[in-house]
Amino acid sequence: MPTIEHISDRALDRIAAYFRALSDSNRLRILRAIMARERNVGELVEMLGGSQANVSKHVGVLVDAGILAREQRGTYSFLRVADPQIHDMCEAVCGSVGRSLDRDLGVRAELLSVPAATKAGVGARGAGKRR
């Protein structure tokens, strides 16, 4: 398996397109729904509350990137995950974001527990003194 140091510029362009496909929260919602099980566009429209045209557009981006695959069954088009590696990547990214949020919440909790005078930049010696 090649590492990023050994990948051509053309391949890097393809990788960037893959990540662009994942850069929209609506597409991530679609991916989350399809990772649970195969779905058709009608189900996705109902779940996400968007228009069929909008959901179809987002699905098209994910299919074009090779993340999802579409299979026609009668009048319905069913979608499934085409790249099984997406599960591992999503777990890695979600774990990283989760740890970052935990750190941010920890910092926020620390800031909220600091006395008001210290938060305002007034030290204990300067509080209440007037010249």
Image: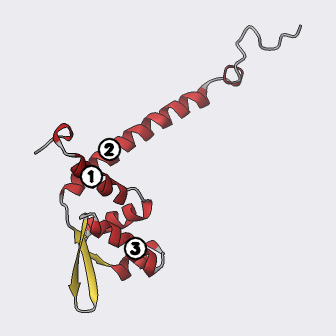
Q: Residue furthest bottom?
A: 74
Mark 3: which amino acid?
Answer: Lys
* 99 up-or-down from 68: above or below: above
For the rendered model, the colour scheme is: secondary structure
Q: Mark 1 packing: few (<14 Cα in 10 Å), some, or many (20+)? A: some
The quarter of the rendered structure image containing the N terminus is top left
Counting residues from the N terminus, which is met first, the one under dot 3 or under dot 1? 1
Residue tagged 2: 95
Counting residues from the N terminus, which is met first, the one under dot 2 or under dot 1? 1
Between residue 13 and residue 70, name the one nearer to us. 13
> Does the residue at mark 3 contact the one at mark 2 (Cβ under 8 Å)?
no
Quadrant in which residue 27 is drawn = bottom left
Residue tagged 3: 57
Between residue 64 and residue 38, name the one nearer to us. 64
Q: Mark 2 packing: few (<14 Cα in 10 Å), some, or many (20+)? A: few
Between residue 128 and residue 58, name the one nearer to us. 58
Q: Secondary structure at mark 2?
A: helix
> Does the residue at mark 2 contact the one at mark 1 (Cβ under 8 Å)?
no
Residue at the location (33% across, 72% down)? 60
Residue tagged 1: 15
- Point out residue 35 in the picture as x, y percentages from the top left corner: 27, 65
In the figure, is residue 15 to the left or right of 109?
Answer: left
* 64 up-or-down from 74: above or below: above
Quadrant in which residue 55 is drawn = bottom left
The quarter of the rendered structure image containing the C terminus is top right
Residue at the location (72% across, 16% down)? 122
Residue at the location (20% across, 66% down)? 82
Residue at the location (44% across, 34% down)? 103
Counting residues from the N terminus, which is met first, the one under dot 3 or under dot 2? 3
Rounded to the nearest whole Å, what is the CA distance between mark 2 and mark 1? 21 Å
- Point out residue 100 in the picture as x, y percentages from the top left corner: 41, 38
